[in-house]
Amino acid sequence: MDGDRERLRATFDLAAQLYDLARPSYPPELFDELVRLAELQPGARLLEIGCGTGKATIPLARRGFEITAVELGNELGERARRNLAGFADVEIVQSAFESWRAPAGATYDLVFAATSWHWVDPAVRYRKAWELLRPGGHLAVWSASHVFPAGGDPFFGEIQDVYDAIGEGLPPGSTFPRPGEVPDWRDEIEAGGLFGDTKIRQFDWPVSYDAEGYINLLQTFSGHIAMEQWKRDKLYGEIRRRLALRPDGRLLRHWGAVLHVAKRRDSDPLGAWVIPPPQIS
């Protein structure tokens, strides 16, 4: 596995409490569409990769599915167990997905990953998901990212001068996608011939934050967790100062998610698998 990916994905466990508090829930419409596109029936068996504190697990557990959730982080997994304690058909397993072994003979109707798929070793993820799915089963992946509607809050552009000053500016060529225009992963999903008939749906939703709420959110992002302390102090101090100048002291961040639901192909094109380039975010 790529060293940076392995190091950064382990940082989330350090912020388990803030992750639970600050990360947004996904819109109900996303789960409704997931259930429809994956043709999930009551009592379907689901496997989640990287459940975190259960942000995507809880809405699906409420829909009555049987869920096994594999989570790398011990603290994240413990919070997920507490959050899902009322659901007898949910099991949280602490393990890296790459090394996890399903019970003998177990297969799943859906393998899914919410804001975690890009952290899984690209040499393993599609092949292993294919092997764990029953014939006709589905893979679903999505991620929550920042989107920028026309006329949206200017705060995010204005604060970039602070990121530049502390040496954490955006890389050249960075883009600012609008709602509904987040790039999808269809080509990557279908590259190896293991999955096809990929359905894509885009969702966006706004969340309002005060200064402390927004800083709590930033402290759940791997890049901010890995920052030197003086950089975080300067950045967070400036966020507090600037938001204090606003009448309501708040900012509005728009989230975007691209739901991909792909069907498992019945034939295994052994030897034809193409490993996509690694993605770090």
Image (cartoon, rainbow, N blue to C red):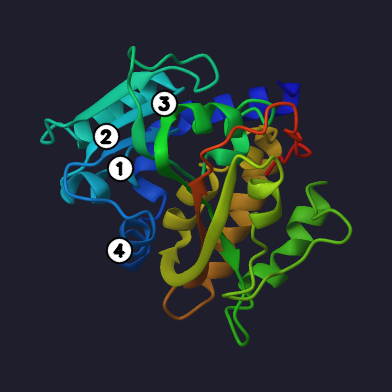
Closer to viewer: mark 2 or mark 3: 2
Tell me the residue that label 1 is attached to.
57
Residue 180 is drawn in which quadrant?
bottom right
Q: Which mark is residue 71?
A: 3
Residue in the image at 57% along x and 43% along y: 221
Report the amino acid beneath label 2.
Answer: Ile
Which is in the foreground here, disc 1 or disc 2?
Answer: 2
| Residue placed most toward the observer, 190 or 116 | 190
Give the residue type that dot 3 points to: Glu
Q: Between disc 4 and disc 3, whose residue precedes?
A: 4
Q: Residue at x 33, y 68 (%)?
A: 29
Q: CA distance from mark 4 to mark 3?
A: 24 Å
- Residue 107 image offset from top left, x and y in percent: 35, 27
The secondary element bearing badge 3 is classed as: strand
Gap between marks 1 and 3 measured at Cα:
12 Å
Looking at the image, can residue 52 be seen? no
Tell whether label 2 touches label 1 (CB within 8 Å). Answer: yes
Residues 42 and 176: in front is: 42
Could you tell whether 116 is left or right of 270 in the image?
Answer: left
Tell me if residue 28 comes above or below residue 92 in the rendering: below
Name above or below for residue 157 compared with residue 280.
below
Q: Which mark is residue 67?
A: 2
Q: Are there few (<14), some (14-19), or many (20+) residues within 10 Å of tag 1?
A: many
Give the foreground label among 4 and 1: 4
Q: Which amino acid type corresponds to the residue marked 1 in the rendered image?
A: Thr
Which quadrant, please, contains the N terminus? top right
